[in-house]
Image (cartoon, helix red, strand yellow):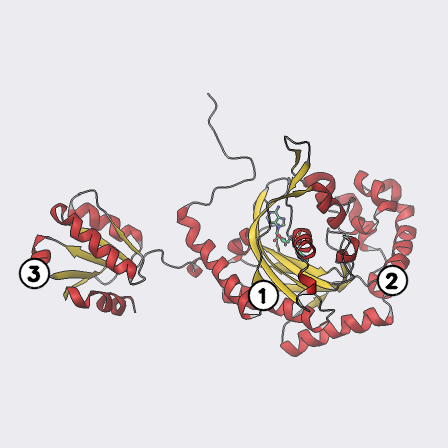
């Protein structure tokens, strides 16, 4: 029989790696909450139409990458490829806009895209992201970008580049579209198949095509910045001035368009230059989508957000950023396993992370496990200690051992942990 394996591009995250995952997720939650965001959780499955209308029909995600299927009732459902459309749906469905002038949400969870798997690119991957409804910017745009940079810095990801652009709004886009089609038309014959098909329907997509044959036409195309209206330009200047005031380095990238159709005005990406990232170097992408809520049937409402790939953050992070998984390892003689269980419980109730080997193995084999566990402290319990009421406290890194009275145990362990 063939061996059972996980779906290609979908990975198990094993306990050995979980310390790093928790570190990223906890740092993100703390930061988002310090900035006034509240967590939202939406279903992994949504009606397919949400993504087709939200992300845009002529995009890589909708044309090629969605996991779409019919359920037993004949409904067409899709595993969410991103979080933005789902958040807007939830915000509209629960009339949140009527209850608060500005909504700030964050989310953490898996997303699904049927892309070609590679290092940093998976079919199930995880995003942390934020969305804001009701603030037209430009200050909040810069604050959002600065928050991402601060989050990465906290995790030791220092070698990054922040790219910003503006896609304009309203008829800026229409005027630019015409100019772009006029530029691309003479190149039509040499463009990739996808780009030829998209030339009229969605010429902006030609600009973020990865196909080598599209690169020259994309690199020589006119840029959106030359088409911005006065209002759009003032908005983009506001974003840049605020970033400068915050001391956040950035570069204007006039050809940055990103692969989703909903963006207007501010657009940004954070590119990682260090770590183990390789070719999938975009750690974070985001932007403003002032038209989406209206397009999905809601009241015209400005919106902006970003999402970061957790796997890519992990690949960029230095190793030492992971926390030790355990505080204490309890080593016990076979005859005192019941009091050892009570001792471990007492420490856990006090908030410490404790593991004990309760199989009755030799002390030597328990010490071997304690050393491997990464716990800085081992507590050793034998018949003698139970009778006398004390416990041996061993600092594993230093090799020192002291006898600690039972009623001072928690305080002594905390002291040893520093
Ligand atoms: P996105 O650029 O499609 O934007 O994805 C954001 C981030 O998710 C990427 O920068 C990358 O780190 C990660 N990512 C995307 N696809 C994969 C993959 N196949 N494997 C691993 N990581 C991946 C969005 O999803 C928008 N919803 C962002 C946004 C929020 N815009 C406004 N609000």
Q: CA distance from mark 2 to mark 3?
A: 82 Å
In the rendering, at what x and y percent does residue 258 appear? 73, 54
The disc at residue 37 is 1
| Horizontal arrangement in the rendering, residue 288 relative to residue 188 (left or right) | left
Q: Nearer the viewer, residue 237 or 414?
A: 414
Query: Which residue is farthest top?
Result: 1
Residue contact between numbered discs 3 and 1, judged by CB atoms under 8 Å: no
Q: Residues within 10 Å of mark 3 (few under 14, many from 20)?
A: few
The disc at residue 334 is none
Residue contact between numbered discs 2 and 3, judged by CB atoms under 8 Å: no
| Horizontal arrangement in the rendering, residue 110 relative to residue 301 (left or right) | left
Q: Which residue is mark 3?
A: 388
The residue that appears at 57% across and 63% down in the rendered structure is: 38
| Horizontal arrangement in the rendering, residue 272 relative to residue 3 (left or right) | right
Q: Answer above or below: position of 275 versus 35.
A: above
The quadrant of the image that shows the C terminus is bottom left
In the rendering, at what x and y percent does residue 62 appear? 72, 42
Q: Which residue is mark 2?
A: 172
Give the SS element for disc 3.
helix
In the rendering, at what x and y percent does residue 32 appear? 56, 65
Label 3 CB-ligand 1 distance < 8 A: no
Give the SS element for disc 2.
helix
Q: CA distance from mark 3 to mark 1?
A: 53 Å
Give the SS element for disc 1.
loop
Work out whether mark 2 precedes mark 3 in sequence or the reverse, and give the earlier one: 2
The residue that appears at 74% across and 59% down in the rendered structure is: 289
Residue depth check, mark 2 versus mark 3: number of the one nearer the observer: 3
Q: Answer above or below: position of 391 versus 48.
A: below
Q: How many marks?
A: 3
Work out whether mark 2 precedes mark 1 in sequence or the reverse, and give the earlier one: 1
Work out whether mark 3 precedes mark 1 in sequence or the reverse, and give the earlier one: 1
């Amino acid at each position: 029989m063939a061996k059972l394996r996980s779906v290609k591009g979908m990975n198990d995250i094993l306990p050995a790696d979980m310390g790093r995952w928790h570190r990223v997720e906890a740092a993100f939650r703390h930061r988002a909450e310090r900035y006034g965001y509240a967590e939202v959780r939406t279903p992994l499955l949504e009606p397919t139409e949400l993504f087709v209308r939200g992300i845009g029909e002529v995009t890589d995600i909708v044309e090629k990458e969605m996991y779409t299927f019919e359920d037993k009732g004949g409904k067409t459902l899709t595993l969410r490829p991103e979080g933005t459309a789902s958040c807007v749906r939830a915000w509209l469905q629960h009339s949140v806009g009527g209850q608060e002038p500005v909504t700030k949400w964050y989310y953490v969870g898996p997303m699904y895209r049927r892309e070609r798997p590679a290092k940093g690119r998976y079919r199930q991957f995880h995003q942390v992201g934020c969305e804001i409804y009701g603030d037209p910017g430009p200050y909040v745009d810069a604050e959002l970008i600065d928050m991402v940079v601060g989050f990465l810095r906290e995790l030791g990801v220092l070698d990054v580049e922040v790219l910003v652009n503006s896609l304009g709004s309203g008829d800026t886009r229409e005027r630019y579209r015409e100019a772009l089609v006029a530029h691309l038309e003479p190149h039509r014959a040499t463009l990739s198949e996808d780009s030829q098909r998209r030339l009229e329907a969605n010429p902006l997509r030609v600009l973020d095509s990865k196909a080598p044959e599209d690169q020259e036409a994309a690199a020589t195309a006119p840029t959106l910045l030359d088409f911005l209206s006065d209002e759009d330009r003032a908005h983009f200047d506001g974003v840049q001035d605020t970033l400068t005031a915050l001391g956040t380095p950035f570069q204007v990238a006039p050809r940055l368009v990103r692969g989703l159709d909903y963006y207007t005005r501010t657009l940004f990406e954070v590119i990682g230059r260090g770590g183990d990232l390789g070719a999938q170097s975009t750690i974070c992408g985001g932007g403003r989508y002032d038209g989406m809520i209206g397009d999905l049937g809601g009241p015209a409402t400005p919106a902006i957000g970003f999402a970061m790939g957790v796997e890519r953050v992990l690949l960029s992070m230095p190793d030492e950023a992971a926390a030790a998984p355990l505080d204490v390892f309890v080593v016990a003689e076979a005859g005192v396993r019941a009091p050892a269980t009570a001792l471990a419980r007492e420490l856990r109730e006090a908030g410490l992370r404790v593991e004990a080997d309760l199989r009755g193995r030799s002390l030597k084999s328990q010490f071997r496990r304690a050393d491997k566990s990464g716990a800085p402290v081992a507590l050793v319990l034998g018949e003698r200690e139970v009778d006398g009421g004390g416990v041996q406290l061993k600092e594993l890194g230093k090799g020192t051992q002291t006898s600690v009275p039972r009623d001072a145990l928690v305080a002594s362990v905390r002291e040893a942990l520093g």
